[in-house]
Image: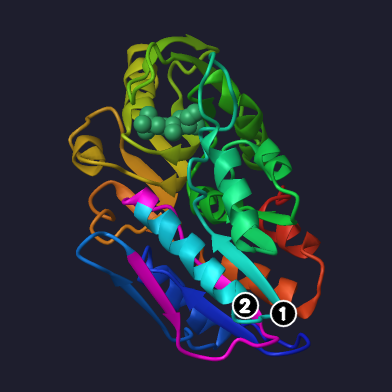
Amino acid sequence: MHTLTGRGSVKLFAGNSHPSLASEIAEILDLPLAKREIVEFSNGNIFIKINETVRDHDVFVIQTANDPVNNNLMELLFMIDTLRYSSPARITAVMPYFPYVRSDKKDQPRTSIGARLVANLLETVGADRVITLNLHSWQIQGFFRIPVDHVLADSIIIDHLRTRDLSNTVAVAPDAGGAKRVEKYAHMLHLPFVIMDKRRAANDDKSHIQNIIGDARGKDAIIFDDEISTGGSVLGTARMLKAHGAEKISAAVVHGVLCGDAVTRINSCPDISEVVCTNSVATPDKASGKVKIHSCAGVLAKAIQHIHNGDALTPIYEEYYYHTT
Ligand code: R5P
C-alpha cells in the first residue's frame, strides 16, 4: 500500500476501458474509486455525471487506449471536461497505453499525427498533467504544454526474464526504430543484440521482416518491443530468427494490445515459446498458453502517490528503469 500524504484530498476516477487495472491501482493506494455515471444513449452520445464533490481535490482519471479506442478516448475527454467544470484543484489523466501512440510524426505527405492531436485535446478539455507508460517515442512528451510523467514498466519485464538462464541469449530489436530501446534492455541484461530489417509497404497493419543484422545462430533470442498489436512483427521476427539458426525464441513487450486473433496466432506458432507483456491494455482472456501478463498497477500507483505527495519521480525511474544490476 502506498501512503498519500499530500496536501488536500485526492480522488481517483476511472473510465470504462480497464476496470480491473483501475481497481488494482485503487487497492494499492487504499482509495475507493470515486462515483460517476457514464451513459451512452441510443444515438451514441455520451453523458457523464460526477457523483461526488471534487472541489479543490487532487483528481486522477484512469483510462487506457483499449479497443474501442475512439470511444474510450472520447469518454476520457468528457470525464475531464466535466470534472474541469466541477472545480478540482488539479486533474491528472492516467493513461497507461497512450491513444494513437504510433502516430507521432508526419513521415508522408498530408498524414495525420494522432498522438499530437490527442495531446491538444487533453489540454483543451483541461487536463493539468498526464501520467503515461512507455511511449512509442519519448518525443511525444514534447507535444504537450503541460507536464507529462512518462513512467516505465521495463523492470517488470526484466525481472521476469532475469529468472532464466540468459548465458546463451541475444536481445533482438524487431526494427531499426526500436534499436535504442533494445540496446538499453541488452545493457540491463548483459546481452549482445541484433536488429531486424522490418519494412511496412503500405499504411496498413502488415509488416515484412526482410533481413537480420547480426548473428543469432545457435542462440536463444528475446525480441523486445514497446507493443504487440497484430503480432505480425513478433511472429515475422521469430520466423526469420528461426531461419537464421536461433534456438528458443521469446518476446517481451510492455503493451499487450494483442488485437484480433493475435493470441491464437502466437499459441499456434512453433517458432515462439513465450510472449510476456503487462496489463496496460485490458487483457481479460488474453493470458493464455504462451502469453504471460504481469501487472503494471504498482508503478502507476507509485506515480500517483509521488505526484500527489509532491515527491520527485526519480526514485521510480531508478526502480523501474535504470536497473542495471
Ligand atoms: C512499431 O513500430 C511498434 O514498435 C511495434 O513493432 C508494432 O506496434 C507491432 O505491431 P504488430 O504487432 O501489429 O506487428
Residue 284 left/right relative to 223:
left
Place of residue 97 in the rendered image (x, y in percent of width and height, measured from the top left): 49, 51
Horizontal and vertical percent position of residue 175: 51, 21
Q: Residue at coordinates 71% horizontally, 62% vertically from top-left?
A: 316
Indicate which disc, 1 or 2, sits on the residue closer to the N terminus: 2
Are the residues tagged 1 and 2 within 8 Å (C-beta)? Answer: yes
Residue at x 29% of width, y 42% of height: 259
Which labelled disc corresponds to residue 146? none
For this rendering, which residue is in front, 236 or 36?
A: 36
Magenta highlight range: 46-70
Residue 217 seen from this side: yes
Q: Nearer the viewer, residue 83 or 64?
A: 83
Identify the amino acid type marked 2.
Val
Crowding at dot 1, Cα within 10 Å, few <14 / some 14-19 / many 20+, comes out as some
Asked if residue 299 can be seen in this view, the reply is no
Is residue 63 within the magenta segment?
yes
Q: Is residue 30 left or right of residue 325?
A: left
Residue shown at 54% from the left, 56% from the top: 156
Image location of residue 236, percent across then percent down? 34, 21
Work out whether residue 117 or residue 45 is closer to the camera in this orientation and state it: 45
Dot 1 amino acid type: Ala
Secondary structure under badge 2? strand
Q: Residues within 10 Å of mark 2 (few under 14, many from 20)?
A: many
Who is closer to the viewer here, 47 or 200? 47
What whole-number distance in Å separates the C-alpha atoms at marks 1 and 2?
Answer: 8 Å
Which residue position is annotated with label 2? Answer: 59
Q: Quadrant of the N terminus?
A: bottom right
Q: Which mark is residue 89?
A: 1
Ligand 1 quarter of the rendering: top left
